[in-house]
Image (cartoon, rainbow, N blue to C red):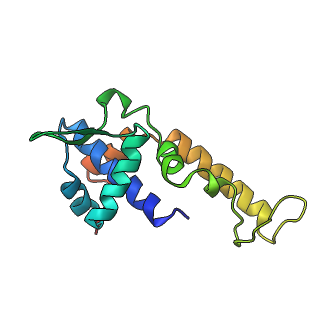
Amino acid sequence: MFSKTCEYGIRAIIYIASQTAKGDRVSQKEVAYEIESPMAFTAKILQQLAKKDLVRSVMGPNGGFEIEESRLREIKIGEVVDAIDGDSIYRGCGLGLKDCNAAQPCPLHDKFVKIRNDLRKMLESTSLYDLAMGLENGLSFLKR
């Protein structure tokens, strides 16, 4: 459903949010380890997130990545998806056809439209804070 880059991006920002909630910054190396992502790939993802002002990069010996604590409840997962994959997830055909639309629908079109709309609602209403607290409370996991 999401691109591999987006999957890692979501995992990375959730991890950073969980550490920010505890008052900690995290290094690129730590993020890569905690989300089980290659270091170079993680670096590119973190650059994208920083460029979109979703995470902040702090240089220096005590530097790392963090999110403004006041923004943890504001930033929704939909913003992360948009920053990495754009809005293609809301427009694509369930069967991968190029030109699927209401006028010339694929066999899954009507059912897939509902799923995409529900997905959009979930992504636009779920905050980083919600997901980070699941990690902190042991209710969810980023790696197995």
Residue 41 visible, this angle: yes
Residue 142 % position (x, y): 31, 60
116 and 5: which is toward the camera: 5
Q: Which residue is drawn at 19% across and 50% down?
A: 27
Residue 138 % position (x, y): 26, 53
Side of 20 relative to 79 (left or right): left
Q: Please, is residue 13 above or below residue 89 in the view?
A: above
- Where does the C terminus fall, quadrant-wise? bottom left
30 and 50: which is toward the camera: 50
Which residue is farthest left? 61
Which residue is farthest top? 70
Q: Please, is residue 27 above or below residue 108 in the view?
A: above
> In terms of image quadrants, where is residue 20?
top left
Residue 141 visible, this angle: no
Residue 23 % position (x, y): 18, 35
Side of 106 relative to 79 (left or right): right
> In terms of image quadrants, where is residue 92?
bottom right
Q: Which residue is drawn at 9% across and 41% down?
A: 61
Q: Residue at x 80, y 65 (%)?
A: 99
Residue 96 % position (x, y): 69, 71
110 and 138: which is toward the camera: 110
- Where does the N terminus fall, quadrant-wise? bottom right
Which residue is farthest right? 103
Q: Residue at x 44, y 36 (%)?
A: 75
Q: Please, is residue 56 above or below residue 37 in the view?
A: above
